[in-house]
Structure formats: C-alpha cells, structure tokens
C-alpha cells in the first residue's frame, strides 16, 4: 500500500504538469487591492481545512476515530489526483492513505470518500441554484440545471430509482458502477458541515474578485463558483475540470455583468489562485506526513 500511494503522488504531479502545459493556464493577474488578495488566500487555506473537516466527519460516522490532521494529510496528498483523468484517483488517494494509516479496509474508506464527494457536489449544486434567480441565462440552461439537480436528489434518496438509474449507467459505460444510497439521517448530520465548507470557499472567491477589481464586483457572481466547481468535477473527461470549470465560470461572470474578455481573464486567474492553494496544501501535507512519521 505504501509503495502504491507513493506512485500515486508521483503520477498525480506528472498529470498536473501535462494538463497545465497543454492548457496554458499560467497568467500574471493585475491586482488592485492586495488587502483583499491576502484575505482571499486566508480563506483559500481555510477551505482546505473545512474540506478536510467534512471528510473526517464522514469517516467518523463509523467508529473510526480518525484525527483531523490525518484527514488533512490525506486530502492534501490526494489533491493532485484530480488531474488524473477519470476522477477516480482523487477518491482513492485519500481513502487509500486513511486505510493504510488506520488499518481500515479500503472498501470502507472508499465508501466514505464517495459519500463525501456526492454530498460536496449536491450541496454545491443547491447553493449554485440560488444564482439562477438573480442572473439572466437562457431558460433552457435553467431547466436543465434544475432537472439535473432534481434527478440527482431522487437518485440519492430513493433506492428503487437509484438501482434503475445505476443499471442504465452500467449499460451505457459498460462498467460496474456502485454508488451509495444516502439515508435522511446521514444527510441531516452531515449537510450543515458541507454548506459551511462551501461558504468558506465562496467567501475566498468573492474576496479574490474584489482584489482584482472592487468596482466590478457584484453579489450575483458568487454562485458561479460552486456551479463551475461542481460541473468541473462532474466533467469526467477533463483532468481537474480544466477547461470546463473556466468555461462555465467565464459564462457566469459575463452573465453577471463583466465583458467577455474580462470574464475569461478572471476565470483563468481564479484557476491559478486555486492551483496555488492545491500545491500549498499538497506540500504542507508532505511536511506533516514526514513530521508524523518521525515521531
């Protein structure tokens, strides 16, 4: 397991470098307010803390007694796994680390990892849905979004529909896909934490927009962040949501009042901002892991 996880880390970094080189995402932004930028970086770091917190809370729904910092290390080391096509490695990376550290069956930690990802997506889509009441977008997009959210809700909570839709997905992709059905009690306990996680991350996003240009900021822009992130995660083909996330966010920022060139530039700057956070948490996790190993 240790050797497998080490190779996972190396492969993640390799795919990150390839993805960035192909997408040409390196851009030097013009910052108008460095105070807001500093605050955005604080909330960016805080977002990885809350991301680790909800992961540990989900794990500890079972009597695992996982420590917060081990959860943080697992999230940080697995963060680059999102750039490996397929998204599977992001889920297996953190699950594999916890399974190794606590001698828990990988199938159990993988189950918790899938639940964490599902609730992250679902809660993000719910928050993002608020934005459609304030931003003018094509009615077809609104109907498609809310229909998708409604079907996802039914899929998660109604076992009979869950099994039928899963069988259809298995036939389409010709793979054995297994996803959990969530209980109402399970969601009630966990969902407030996932909403709080999103609030922290959206706040960091809003502060970055203020840093770029306080005069152009509007509250309608904020739902674009969870919408773009969730749709980027759900875009299985694009590594780390590269391209998908930026396209969705640029569209939303343009619909919120920015001209298309500025909206596109902002979307690329925001990707760079997130990448800074991902690389930072990855290297911090490496240092914490080494420190923990030496004790």
Image: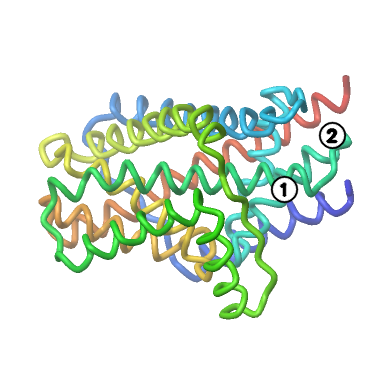
Q: Nearer the viewer, residue 280 or 187?
A: 187
Residue carrying label 1: 110
35 sits to left or right of 93: left
Q: Nearer the viewer, residue 161 or 36?
A: 161
In this view, 146 is above or below 38: below
Residue neighbourhood size for the residue with mark 1, other residues' Cα within 10 Å, grouped as few (<14), some (14–19), many (≥20): many
Foreground label between 1 and 2: 1
At x 23%, y 63%, the residue is 143
At x 69%, y 70%, the residue is 176
The label number, if any, that marks residue 243 in the structure image:
none
Mark 1 vs 2, N-terminal side: 2
Q: Quadrant of residue 202?
A: top left
Q: Nearer the viewer, residue 258 or 92?
A: 92
Tell me residue 213's x, y (percent): 18, 39
Q: Nearer the viewer, residue 215 or 219?
A: 219
At x 69%, y 28%, the residue is 60
Tell me residue 243's x, y (percent): 40, 65
Residue carrying label 2: 101
Does dot 2 land on a helix, a strand or a loop? helix
Q: Quadrant of residue 248?
A: bottom left
Gap between marks 1 and 2, in whole Å? 14 Å
Tell me residue 12's x, y (percent): 67, 57
In this view, 32 is above or below 250: above
| Tag 1 near tag 2, CB within 8 Å | no
Does dot 1 land on a helix, a strand or a loop? helix
Tell me residue 197's x, y (percent): 45, 31
165 sits to left or right of 89: left
Q: Quadrant of residue 36?
A: top left
């Amino acid at each position: 397991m240790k050797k497998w996880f080490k190779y996972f880390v190396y492969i993640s970094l390799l795919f990150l470098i390839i993805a960035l080189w192909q997408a040409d995402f390196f851009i030097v932004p013009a910052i108008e307010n460095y105070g807001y930028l500093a605050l955005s970086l604080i909330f960016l770091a805080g977002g990885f803390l809350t991301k680790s917190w909800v992961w540990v809370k989900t794990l500890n729904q079972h009597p695992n007694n996982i420590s917060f910092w081990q959860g943080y290390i697992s999230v940080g080391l697995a963060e680059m796994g999102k750039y490996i096509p397929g998204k599977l490695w992001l889920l297996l990376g953190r699950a594999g680390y916890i399974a190794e550290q606590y001698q828990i069956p990988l199938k159990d930690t993988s189950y918790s990892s899938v639940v964490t990802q599902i609730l992250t997506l679902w809660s993000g889509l719910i928050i993002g849905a608020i934005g459609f009441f304030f931003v003018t977008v094509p009615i077809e997009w609104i109907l498609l979004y809310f229909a998708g959210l409604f079907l996802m809700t039914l899929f998660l909570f109604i076992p009979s529909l869950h099994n039928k839709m899963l069988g259809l997905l298995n036939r389409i992709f010709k793979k054995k896909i297994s996803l959990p059905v969530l209980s109402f009690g399970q969601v009630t306990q966990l969902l407030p934490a996932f909403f709080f996680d999103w609030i922290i991350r959206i706040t960091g996003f809003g502060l970055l927009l203020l840093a770029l240009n306080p005069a152009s900021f509007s509250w309608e822009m904020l739902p674009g962040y969870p919408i773009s992130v969730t749709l980027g995660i759900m875009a299985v083909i694009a590594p780390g949501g590269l391209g998908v996330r930026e396209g969705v966010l640029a569209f939303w920022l343009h619909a919120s009042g920015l001209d298309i060139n500025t909206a596109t530039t902002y979307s690329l700057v925001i990707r760079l901002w997130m990448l800074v956070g991902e690389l930072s948490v990855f290297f911090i996790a490496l240092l914490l892991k080494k420190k923990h190993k030496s004790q």
